[in-house]
Image (cartoon, rainbow, N blue to C red):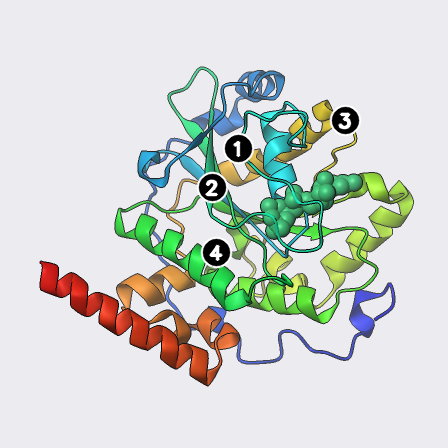
Amino acid sequence: MTDNADNTSTHLLEEDTPYTTRKPVDEPSNIDISFASKDEIYKKLVADTSSAQVILEKDISPQDIIIMVMGPTGTGKTSFIRGAVGNGTTEEEDPKLQLHVGHRLDSKTNVVTCVKIPIPTTKQNFVLVDTPGFDDGAKSDAKVLECIADWLKSTYKRGICLSGIIYLHRINDIRLDTGVQNTLTLFQRICGGFVFNRINLVTTMWNEVPPERGEIKEKQLVDSKYWQPMTRRGDGKRGAFVTRFNMTTVEQARETALEAMWKLAGRADRKMVLLLQQELVDDKKSLPKTQAGQMTYSVWSGALFRAKEFFTKDKEEAKE
Ligand SMILES: Nc1nc2c(ncn2[C@@H]2O[C@H](COP(=O)(O)OP(=O)(O)OP(=O)(O)O)[C@@H](O)[C@H]2O)c(=O)[nH]1
Ligand SMILES: [Mg+2]
């Protein structure tokens, strides 16, 4: 494909779209989002996020505004989170924060990691959830999906739902190669179409492209068949946000990361349940049988997964 994202021969969304098949969950979230309209709180947050810390999944509360950061490997997920908490986007600049940024071609983040950021003058917190990247040379998409699905399943079982998702895309990618396209389809299958308005499509690497070129690229993406189903939903409802992460300076990184999160916080008053969570927990489906799983598991690896699951379950049941 050339610069024009529509010139590609692979049609990403022509296949059976997963997101019209489920009824949306429409319940209040119990999260107080009144802070999201207060400029003074936002300014205080941007001025200082130094009390952020890595926490365990069990320490997340249902009142936290939880934002998962997803996307292909190397798009800058971990750098985005480091950018949000402010002491620099690299491990050298801030070695205390246990988040590893990749400098090689294979993926750096191997586990789901949560970072809590207290919201000034409130009792609330943002929790950013770093995830391993898809389309990675060193591990299969099935392994990455398994890791993310385990986390989503275990939190949903505890009544903890995400408040939003940040999906990263490199603005300096010349084309949307097959790996990037597949990851986007997989992502849509994880989410389901009813939660597209809770997604922020954030472009990274703005310090790697001339601004005018980046702007043209961004517009092409928004108008392309890849992003349009998320940004302009056909049912007339609000679609995904589109914002930028710019890590030219530490201040810009913090401002642009927090702005991306703040937008999602403004919509966190309703529960957000992903299609994958409904399939795994409500329908008790095995991961390879879910819409996302069907894309990532072959017949053999799916059968192997289910056999393992069967024997683990048996053992767990015997223990009880
Ligand atoms: N110039 C520039 N480099 C970036 C930006 N974001 C990330 N990087 C660099 O891109 C590389 C990969 O960044 P990571 O933050 O590790 O990417 P990731 O998405 O977490 O990757 P995985 O953990 O492997 O999935 C690192 O060398 C970062 O320094 C950006 O906005 N601009
Ligand atoms: Mg990472």
Say few, some or many: other residues with alpha carbon within 10 Å of mark 2 (under 14 / 14 to 19 / 20 or more): many
Choose the circle earlier in sequence order: 1 or 2.
1
Residue under pointer 1: 98
Q: Where does residue 169 sit, x and y in percent of width and height? A: 69, 52
Choose the circle earlier in sequence order: 4 or 1.
1
In whole angstroms, how far apart are the C-alphas of marks 4 and 1? 30 Å
Q: Is residue 4 above or below residue 254?
A: below
Q: Residue shown at 30%/77% (left/top)? A: 307
Secondary structure beneath dot 1 equals loop
Q: Are marks 1 and 3 in contact (CB under 8 Å)?
A: no
Secondary structure beneath dot 3 equals loop
Mark 4 vs mark 2: give the one in front: 2
In this rendered view, identify the residue nearer to me: 74 or 95: 95
Residue 302 placement, left or right of 11: left
Q: Residue shown at 17%/65% (left/top)? A: 315
- Residue type (three-letter) at the residue carrying disc 2: Thr
Residue under pointer 2: 113
- Residue type (three-letter) at the residue carrying disc 3: Thr
- Residue type (three-letter) at the residue carrying disc 4: Val
Residue under pointer 4: 195
Choose the circle earlier in sequence order: 1 or 3.
1
